[in-house]
Structures are given as structure tokens and as C-alpha cells.
């Protein structure tokens, strides 16, 4: 198991190129079957979001419950995922409310999390066909590291929270995993693995997943917000990740 590749360079908004796939086919239309899609007969790369995609919960919301400000944080999360708030600013605001929590909170929250139905089966099936799995999270390494080990995930990136004297300071360390960082992770991992973008799949539910969804050979919106569904090639609205396999050629 690898914890990603060497540091992914910082990206600016100018690095993100949105792809209008509506000219190729309408999302969910029969015409979509004519568009080339990744195949299980060749090595590939699947990259997915963590919160509300790989797992059923939003980790930041669960941390908020422990901190006694769950409703406030959940409200900001929902607005950020709909694209109503700038993700990095929204994350900093939510993390500030966690100041003073002991680092043991990560174990407490981890024990409440559930892999989404079909997540582990999807990962195992793709591994059997020579694929690699990466996750890109706007959440936190302190939890994602444990999920990656349990889910046999190959590569991952996430945010890290500052700790002092065994407690959270309410600040994020280093560069935030934004939509541009997620996009570049997909591109970097594919390049390092020698996998063409046509053999990549990106899965996510929030507005910050849109750039990687549009850049992948197949972009899937998973029980996603309206903007994300419109941006994707296909939308899966049943919380079962094995449906991803329905869109891959055998």
C-alpha cells in the first residue's frame, strides 16, 4: 500500500479546464453508449471522494457533533457541497469551531463511520482486474489513513489538522485539498502509473469533485448535489457503489 505519490504541486483556478461533455451525449441518455468508456480488460485508475461517497458520513460533521456545534457545521458543509460557498473558506470556518478537541476524537469518530454499501466489493473487483484505487478527501488524514488501510486503497490525500498539547488548534496545516488539488491528484496518479485518462474513473458527490469528474475518462456523480449531477457523464442515485461497475466495459 502506498500513501500517494510525492507532493502534488499547488494549483490555481487557471489550471482547471471544465469540459462540456453535453456535446458528446446527454447525461443518462441512450446516446451515451456510443461514447468510449474505460474497460476492465486493461489496467485503470478509479479516484473517488471520501465523505458521503466512500463512506456514508461527513467526518467534519461528526467532529462537530462531538464539539457541540454539529448543526452549525453541518449547515456550512451542505452549502459548500452545493457550491454555494468557497470550499477552502468554508473548511477553515468549520475547523475553527473544533478548537480544543483532544486528538482522541479521531478514534471516536472513526468508530462511528461506515463504508458505503458496495465500496469494498468495488475496490476488490477493480483490484482483481489490475486497477488502482485512489481517494481524495477534503476531510482529514487522521481519519482517512485508517479508512485507506481498512479499504485496501492504494493512494490517498487529505487535509491535516494542527495539534498542540494533544488538542486541535482550530487550524488546517498546509495546503487544503481543494477541487484543483483533487483534479491534479487524478492526473498525477494516472501519469505516474502510465494509465491514459481514457482509462480513469472519478466518483464524487460535491461541487468540489466536479473538475476531476469532468477530466476523467468516465465521471460519475454518486448520490450527488444537482450541480455535480449535471457535470457528470452518468449519475448513480442508489447508495451502492457496485453500480460503478455497470458503466465499465468488460
Image (tube, rainbow, N blue to C red):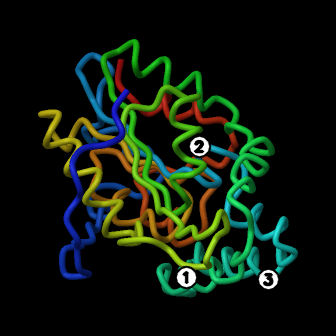
Secondary structure found at label 1 = helix
Q: Earlier in the sequence, mark 3 or mark 1?
A: 3
Real-space CA distance between mark 3 and mark 2, rounded to the nearest whole angstrom: 24 Å
Q: Which residue is mark 3?
A: 72
At x 51%, y 36%, the residue is 148
Q: Quadrant of the N terminus?
A: top left
In the rendered image, which quarter is residue 176 located in?
Answer: bottom left
Q: Is residue 122 above or below residue 33?
A: above
Q: Position of residue 22 (x, y in %)?
A: 33, 64
Query: Badge 3: how crowded within 10 Å, few (<14), some, or many (20+)?
Result: some
Q: Position of residue 45 (x, y in %)?
A: 31, 35
In the rendered image, which quarter is residue 133 located in?
Answer: top left
Q: Which residue is mark 1?
A: 92
Q: Position of residue 201 (x, y in %)?
A: 36, 42
Q: Position of residue 120 (x, y in %)?
A: 59, 26
In this orientation, which residue lies closer to the viewer: 168 or 250? 168
Q: Earlier in the sequence, mark 2 or mark 1?
A: 2
Q: Which residue is mark 2?
A: 54
Q: Nearer the viewer, mark 2 or mark 1?
A: 1
Q: Earlier in the sequence, mark 3 or mark 2?
A: 2
Taking 56 as reference, is 230 left or right? Answer: left
In this orientation, which residue lies closer to the viewer: 150 or 200? 150
Q: Nearer the viewer, mark 3 or mark 1?
A: 1
Query: Badge 1: how crowded within 10 Å, few (<14), some, or many (20+)?
Result: some
Taking 124 as reference, is 56 left or right? Answer: right
In this orientation, which residue lies closer to the viewer: 240 or 180? 180
Real-space CA distance between mark 3 and mark 1, rounded to the nearest whole angstrom: 14 Å
At x 24%, y 23%, the residue is 43
At x 74%, y 69%, the residue is 101
Amino acid at each position: 500500500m502506498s500513501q500517494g505519490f510525492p507532493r502534488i504541486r499547488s494549483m490555481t483556478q487557471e489550471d482547471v479546464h471544465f469540459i462540456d461533455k453535453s456535446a458528446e451525449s446527454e447525461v443518462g441518455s441512450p446516446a451515451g453508449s456510443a461514447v468510449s468508456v474505460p474497460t476492465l480488460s486493461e489496467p485503470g485508475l478509479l479516484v473517488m471522494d471520501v465523505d458521503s461517497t466512500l463512506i456514508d458520513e461527513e467526518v467534519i460533521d461528526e467532529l462537530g457533533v462531538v464539539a457541540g456545534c454539529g448543526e452549525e457545521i453541518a449547515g456550512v458543509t451542505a452549502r459548500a457541497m452545493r457550491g454555494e460557498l468557497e470550499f477552502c473558506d468554508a473548511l477553515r470556518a468549520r475547523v475553527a469551531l473544533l478548537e480544543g478537541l483532544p486528538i482522541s476524537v479521531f478514534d471516536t469518530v472513526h468508530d462511528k463511520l461506515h463504508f458505503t454499501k458496495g465500496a469494498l466489493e468495488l475496490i476488490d473487483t477493480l483490484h482483481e482486474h489490475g486497477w488502482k484505487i485512489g481517494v481524495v478527501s477534503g476531510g482529514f488524514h487522521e481519519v482517512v489513513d485508517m479508512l485507506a488501510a481498512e479499504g485496501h486503497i492504494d493512494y490517498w490525500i487529505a487535509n491535516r489538522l494542527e495539534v498542540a498539547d494533544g488538542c486541535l488548534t482550530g487550524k488546517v496545516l498546509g495546503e487544503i485539498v481543494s477541487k484543483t488539488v483533487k483534479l491534479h491528484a487524478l492526473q498525477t496518479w494516472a501519469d505516474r502509473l502510465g494509465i491514459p485518462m481514457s482509462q480513469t474513473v472519478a466518483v464524487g458527490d460535491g461541487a468540489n469533485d466536479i473538475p476531476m469528474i469532468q477530466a476523467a475518462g468516465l465521471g460519475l456523480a454518486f448520490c450527488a448535489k444537482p450541480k455535480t449531477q449535471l457535470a457528470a457523464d452518468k449519475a448513480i442515485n442508489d447508495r451502492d457503489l457496485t453500480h460503478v461497475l455497470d458503466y465499465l466495459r468488460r
